[in-house]
Image (spheres, rainbow, N blue to C red):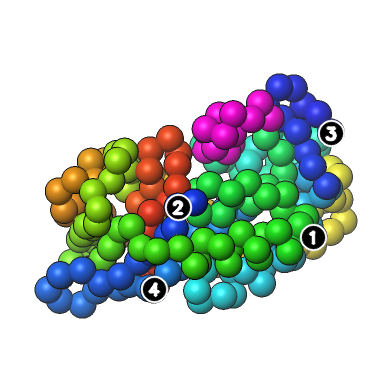
Amino acid sequence: MNAGAWLHRAGLAGLVVGAVGISGPAHAQQTPVVVELFTSQGCVACPPADAYFAELAAQTDLIALALHVDYWDYLGWKDSFGSAAFTQRQKRYAKAAGARMIYTPQVIVGGLDRVEGTRPQEIRDSIAAHAAMAPRVTLGVRWQGERLTIEAEADPPLGKPAVVHLVRYDPEETVLIERGENAGQTITYHNIVTDWSAIGEWSGKAALMLSADAMGPEPLVVIVQEAGPGPILAAVRLER
């Protein structure tokens, strides 16, 4: 289904995290690849991708995040997790890649690889390729009350500036879809992004240190991504 120049439906750099020189308890994971799924409750092609995404969300060596877009809401069912902000993020990815259309389900691996969400083997291959890449950024995060202290170092220094993002997500929700293309289906969604905020910029030259408010019950992810958006350089997941 084509919905204009930006809308279409379709049936390199590594991400590495390590501990840095931080005093106190820190949270870090080794080489988690970030996998973003752009999906919608109103998309008839999305349920199989959502089901496969549940497998990715269960893997501890990945950070799998589902971003529900809002551009299919006109089909008769308003996505209860949909956000115009996530539609805009997908559009920025498309622009960075020189693409004129966006679609669901779409998977972005490591901020770079664009894969149709209905192609699990291609997704697995992309994840494996990113997991094998050498570190570029070392990232450490620790709690200070209800705030996070975030530190990062790049070796060698980055050639382009990066953005630090704080992502909040809901681990699991089940939804009965009453109207639209998926009417009558009950679907369980995983790692549903509820907020994605840019909290700082980093030149990638000197070491980074910043603090961010982390109040609330939801799990968090800190992501360092080349501006553009470009490759995801580092990420840490923090459980409450």
**Amino acid on which the number 2 mark rests in the picture:** Ala
Going 19% across and 45% down the picture, which residue do you hit?
205
**Amino acid on which the number 1 mark rests in the picture:** Pro
Instruction: Please state the horizontal and vertical placement of residue 168, each as a whole percent of the image.
Output: 44, 57
Q: Mark 3 touching mark 2, by CB under 8 A? A: no
Q: Secondary structure at mark 1?
A: helix
Instruction: Please state the horizontal and vertical placement of residue 139, each as a whole percent of the image.
Output: 28, 62
Q: Residues within 10 Å of mark 1 (few under 14, many from 20)?
A: some
- Ranked by sequence position, the earlier of labels 4 and 1 is 4
Location of residue 2 (image quadrant): top right
Q: CA distance from mark 3 to mark 1?
A: 17 Å
From the image, tell me which residue sits under label 4: 30
- Ranked by sequence position, the earlier of labels 3 and 4 is 3
Q: Mark 4 touching mark 2, by CB under 8 A? A: no
Q: Tell me where the magenta segment starts and ends, as one range.
A: 87-101
Left or right: 189 as drawn, with respect to 199: right
Q: CA distance from mark 3 to mark 4?
A: 40 Å
Q: Which mark is residue 1?
A: 3
Chief secondary structure of the magenta portion: helix
Q: CA distance from mark 4 to mark 1?
A: 29 Å
From the image, tell me which residue sits under label 2: 13
Q: Residues within 10 Å of mark 3 (few under 14, many from 20)?
A: few
Left or right: 179 as drawn, with respect to 80: right
Q: Residues within 10 Å of mark 4 (few under 14, many from 20)?
A: some
Count of marks, rendered view? 4
Q: Residues within 10 Å of mark 2 (few under 14, many from 20)?
A: many
State which mark lies toward you, 4 or 2.
2
State which mark lies toward you, 1 or 2.
2
Location of residue 56 (image quadrant): bottom right
Q: Residue furthest top?
A: 5
**Amino acid on which the number 4 mark rests in the picture:** Gln
Q: CA distance from mark 4 to mark 2?
A: 16 Å
